[in-house]
Amino acid sequence: MTPTLADAERLDAADPLASFRDRFLVPDDPGLVAYLDGNSLGRPPKATAERLAALVTHDWGTRLIRSWSEGWMELPFEIGDRLAAAVLGAEPGQTVVADSTTVCLYKLMRAAAAMRPGRDEVVADRGNFPTDRYVVEAVAAECGLTVRWISPDPAGGVTLADVVDHVGERTAFVTLSHVAYRSAWIADLHGITAAAHDAGALVVWDLCHSVGSVPLDLDAAGVDLAAGCTYKFLNAGPGAPAFLYVAAALQDGFAQPITGWMGHAEPFAMGRDYAPATGMRRALSGTPPITGLIGVDEGVKLVAEAGMDRIRAKAVALTELAVTLADDLLDGVGIGSPRDPARRGGHVTVTHPDAKTLSDRLIAAGVVVDHRPPDGIRIGLSPLTTSFAELHRAMTVFADVLQMS
């Protein structure tokens, strides 16, 4: 039997995370039926607005440049450690918040290539997010590497068997997304990392669609290097800085390619030659983006309070409801995500030959989704801000839009 709106409302009444919706700003937009794109840009927390106002009036407005020595300089590391504890499963001293995901991935891939001299191949996913593929190609060209591409099922993702088939004694590093941006396929983090290590290679993980959605245990998995954004499930704000994770055992050999003054052992010595700092400070390049860091900090606090186990449980329940409603209500639409919830992250992609037109019509009807070429419509389900009733109303609108097309 197809779940009803009343069924969805009962799920909301029993939802232990329901109260978190009140911790976010809700737009005065009567035309908005549902926001199902929180996996691209999360809603703004009320605490972030308050914290930014205080930053402008006090830390920046009153203390001015003195705030650098009164705490700003350490924010990338302090917030990085809080992020690591809340969502990465990582001990302190291995994570720093800085730059964009693209820049972070570039730093990690160049460092990984340098840490495996004599190896001339990199294994990557042909279906990965464009940035990842573009950075792989650039690093390969700069370092004289050959890319061995894996071409996975678009409705799934890279498997352990795929990686085993592609790695070898020439592999410098493997780079993959833990959760596929299109299908939400969850890769085998532990198994793939171990397989790469068995071949003597490193792994660079992109965690953009994992962080704040799927529990992680980077230290236990033996992960080498990882990066991810903070403006999706961490709700840190548009363009908020990303993060880098470098396992403690690799930090002494980590030579990142964008050497700036903040990564120097003595930034304010203004020395003639570059000398890398110890620990994660060497991963920095330029001046930390304080306003963006505030957004990350408040987003991490909310996720830490909610707890990743509860967030994951709700993500599974939301995606299960989305799949069921898609099967029951959406004629002519396929499922472009794994049906096994254990293999599916925090969004569901449905497929249709005219996906772009349908996406535009859905947005015009008040259901905000996004289109992923060639035929995907991605339904993003953010556990702290998406309700079951909101999802049900959206899928009902989706069915109406289909009937009119």
Image (cartoon, rainbow, N blue to C red):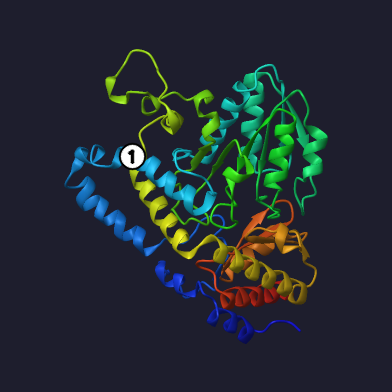
Name the image quarter holding the N terminus. bottom right
Where is residue 5 drawn, in percent x and y?
Answer: 62, 83
In the figure, is residue 245 to the left or right of 45? Answer: right
Of residues 14 and 182, the one nearer the viewer is 14
In the figure, is residue 65 to the left or right of 7? Answer: left
Where is residue 326 drawn, in percent x and y?
Answer: 73, 71
In the picture shown, does residue 402 fall above or below 115? Answer: below
Where is residue 384 drawn, in percent x and y?
Answer: 50, 66
Residue 364, image quadrant: bottom right
Residue 344, image quadrant: bottom right
Q: How many marks?
A: 1
Seen from this angle, which residue lies furthest left? 62
Question: Does residue 405 show up?
Answer: no
Identify the residue at image location x=34%, y=43%.
290
| Residue labelled with disc 1 | 74
Type of amino acid under label 1: Glu
Identify the residue at image location x=73%, y=51%.
374
